[in-house]
Amino acid sequence: MDNEVPIPLSATPSPAPHPANCWAAGPADFARLQAGAVVSRLADLSVLQAEGPDAVSFLQTQSTADIAAMSSASWQLGGYCTAKGRLLAIFQAWRWQSGVRLLLQADLAEATLRRLSTYVLRAKVRLSDVSASWVALGICGAGSAQALLRTGVNVPDEPWQCREIEADERVARLPCGSSCPERLLLLVPAARLDTWLRRLPLVAQVDPGVWWWSQVDAAIPAVFAATRELFVPQSLNLEVLGGVSFRKGCYPGQEVVARSQYLGKLRRRMGLAHTAQLGPAADVFHSGESDPVGRIVMAAQCADGGWDLLYECPTELAEYGSLHAGGRDAPALTLRALPYRIFDPTR
C-alpha cells in the first residue's frame, strides 16, 4: 500500500452517472477497506451554523431532536420538517461555543438555510452557511480509531458522541452495520486539510462511495433534494435512532409526528436490502402491485459489484412476494436485517 498513489482528497470528485442518493466505488477501494482503515473527503456535505444567545432555543423549536439537551460531547441526529410532518432535511448537530452547527446534504443547504431564516423573527440568532471553511472526512474500517489515536486524537467510545480536538475541530463516532466495524467523522478547517492528511499516512484515501456504502450498511438515512418532503421521520426509523424527541416542545410537524406515533399508524418503514442490479427509476416495486409501493432512500455499490440500499415502503409488503428497486424487471431484493431494533421510544 505504501507504493500506491493516493486519491487527492482536495480535488473535486468526478461526477458519477448515478442520482445524488446513489454512490459507486471501485473494487480497488473496497480492497483497501478490507485491508484496514480508509478515509474519504465528503464533498457532498455542508455545514450550517447558528450562533447567538438564542441559537439553541431557536433550533429547539425547529428540530425533531432535543437540541437543548445536547452536551458538548453530543453528536445529535435530527430532522427538519414541514408543517405536515414531512422531512425537509436530516442533519447531525453538535454544540460549539455559543451555538450549534448542523451537517447535512449539500444539495439541501441553501433551501434549509433560507427556510430557517424566515422563522428567526426577533430571536437573537445568526444563521449562516460555513461550508467553505470546513471539510468533513469519513474514516471507516478496522483500525480507524487506532489510526487517529496514533495522531494524538482520543476517539469517543460510544456512537453519537464527539470530542473536540483543537481549534474547534471535532471527531465523532457513528453507528456501524454488520460489514464495517468502525465509522468516524472528522470535521476540520479547510485550511488544515493537507495537514490532516499528512497526519494520517497509513490510512488509505478512497472514493467517498465507500463511506456512503458504510452509511447504508449502518442503515443511517439521509434526505436529498430529490427526496425532500417524501418521508415522515418514523418511516426512515429516525425515532429509533434517537433523532426524534417526544418530550420536548413544539416544532414544525410535531403534531403529525406525535399523532402517528401514539395512534399506532406507522405502516411504512425503512428497510435494508441487497440487489445485483438497480433499475433506472427511483421507485420500489412489489411483485403483487401494479403501482410503485415505495422509494429508494439511498444506495451504494458494494464489494461484490452489486448494490446495498435503504428503501421505504409499507411494512407488510416485505412479508410476501418480492420487492424490486428501480424497475419492475430489476432483480428481486434480498432483504437484510437492520443493525438495530425497531421499538417504541415513548413506552
Image (spheres, rainbow, N blue to C red):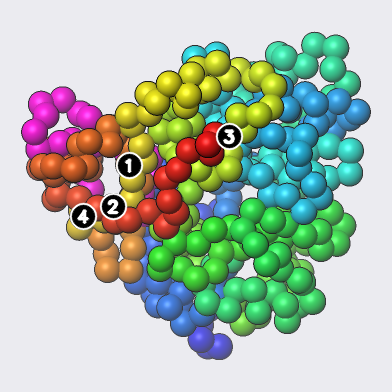
Q: Is residue 253 magenta?
A: no
Q: Is residue 307 left or right of residue 62?
A: left
Q: Which mark is residue 334?
A: 4
Mark 3 or 1, nearer chain start: 3
Q: Is residue 299 magenta?
A: yes
Query: Which region shows up in magenta?
Result: 278-300
Q: Which residue is mark 3?
A: 244
Badge 1 local density, few (<14 within 10 Å), some, or many (20+)?
many
Q: Which residue is mark 1?
A: 311
Badge 4 local density, few (<14 within 10 Å), some, or many (20+)?
some
Give above or below for 224 relative to 250: below
Give above or below for 108 relative to 211: above
| Local SS, label 4 | strand
Q: Amino acid at mark 4?
A: Thr
Q: Residues under labels 1 and 2: Cα distance?
A: 8 Å
Mark 1 or 4, nearer chain start: 1
Asked if the residue under mark 4 is in contact with the one under mark 1, i.e. CB atoms within 8 Å, the reply is no
Q: Amino acid at mark 2?
A: Ala
Whether residue 272 is visible = yes
Badge 3 local density, few (<14 within 10 Å), some, or many (20+)?
many
Residue 26: x %, y % from top left? 36, 67
Q: Residues under labels 3 and 4: Cα distance?
A: 29 Å
Mark 1 or 2, nearer chain start: 2
Q: Which residue is mark 2?
A: 273
Q: Residues under labels 2 and 4: Cα distance?
A: 5 Å
Mark 2 or 4, nearer chain start: 2
Asked if the residue under mark 2 is in contact with the one under mark 1, i.e. CB atoms within 8 Å, the reply is yes
Q: Amino acid at mark 3?
A: Val
Q: Is residue 319 left or right of residue 36?
A: left
